[in-house]
Amino acid sequence: DTGVSQDPRHKITKRGQNVTFRCDPISEHNRLYWYRQTLGQGPEFLTYFQNEAQLEKSRLLSDRFSAERPKGSFSTLEIQRTEQGDSAMYLCASSFGAGSGDTQYFGPGTRLTVL
Amino acid sequence: KNEVEQSPQNLTAQEGEFITINCSYSVGISALHWMQQHPGGGIVSLFMLSSGKKKHGRLIATINIQEKHSSLHITASHPRDSAVYICAVIRGSQGNLIFGKGTKLSVKP
């Protein structure tokens, strides 16, 4: 247990539905990252926050995806009008510091299945 | 071509064997991570390197910045080492990781 939690751990939804995932980072960590991992592939970067500010978004993050970190603590990732291609493991990670070399601690992930 | 390439993709070894997993990258980086991922998703950071060599128990990681190459070695491998090992790099000051596809290691007793 790294101290980063994600909820839910599994989500099955029908195509077209909206889903929201939550990530609770380690409490003193100021950076929070979202990644997506499909079967047999390494994770891919989606977006990251420093405190409450969303500093970067990948081009993978289409307009159906939105992420928030309203108080600089927990974060939510929402997918609207889900598609079968959204099926993946969504991973959250957090780190402390302002440098690029800080260790990221990963949560257990939320596995999304879109039917 | 992926910015981070790992080899081999799959590796089967007998308990006790010395194992090497390789990672090559094509971009300028500020640091490189080796991570371990067990079935079910959990990723654990093993090493973060920006130069030279690090050792932790039976694990050794090296990096050659000029050649843009890193290796992860496992000495005296054990079935509990079976996992996916992932190389990831940090490009510049962004902080977000660029991952390789991972190497699936299976150590047989």
Image: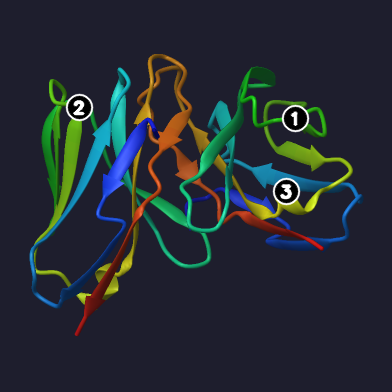
**Residue type of the residue flagged with mark 3:** Asp
Residue A7 position in % (x across, y down): 71, 55
- Identify residue for label 1: A62
Q: Are marks 3 and 2 in contact (CB under 8 Å)?
A: no
**Residue type of the residue flagged with mark 1:** Ser
Alpha carbon distance from label 3 to label 2: 33 Å
Q: Are marks 3 and 1 on the same chain?
A: yes
Image quadrant assignment for residue A67: top right
**Residue type of the residue flagged with mark 2:** Lys
- Identify residue for label 3: A86
Read off the chain for label 2.
Answer: B
Height in image: B19 above or below B44? below
Height in image: B79 above or below A89? below
Q: How busy is the neighbourhood of tag 1: few (under 14 within 10 Å), some, or many (20 plus)?
A: few
Image quadrant assignment for residue A14: bottom right
- Identify residue for label 2: B68
Q: Are marks 3 and 2 on the same chain?
A: no
Read off the chain for label 1.
Answer: A
Q: Is residue A43 left or right of residue B85?
A: right
- Pick the quarter of the image with the C terminus of chain A: bottom right
Alpha carbon distance from label 3 to label 1: 11 Å
- What colouring method underlies this structural image? rainbow
Height in image: A14 above or below B70? below
Q: Answer with mark 3 or mark 1, whichever residue precedes in sequence.
A: 1
Per the image, label 1 sits on a secondary structure element best described as loop
Residue A24 position in % (x across, y down): 65, 44
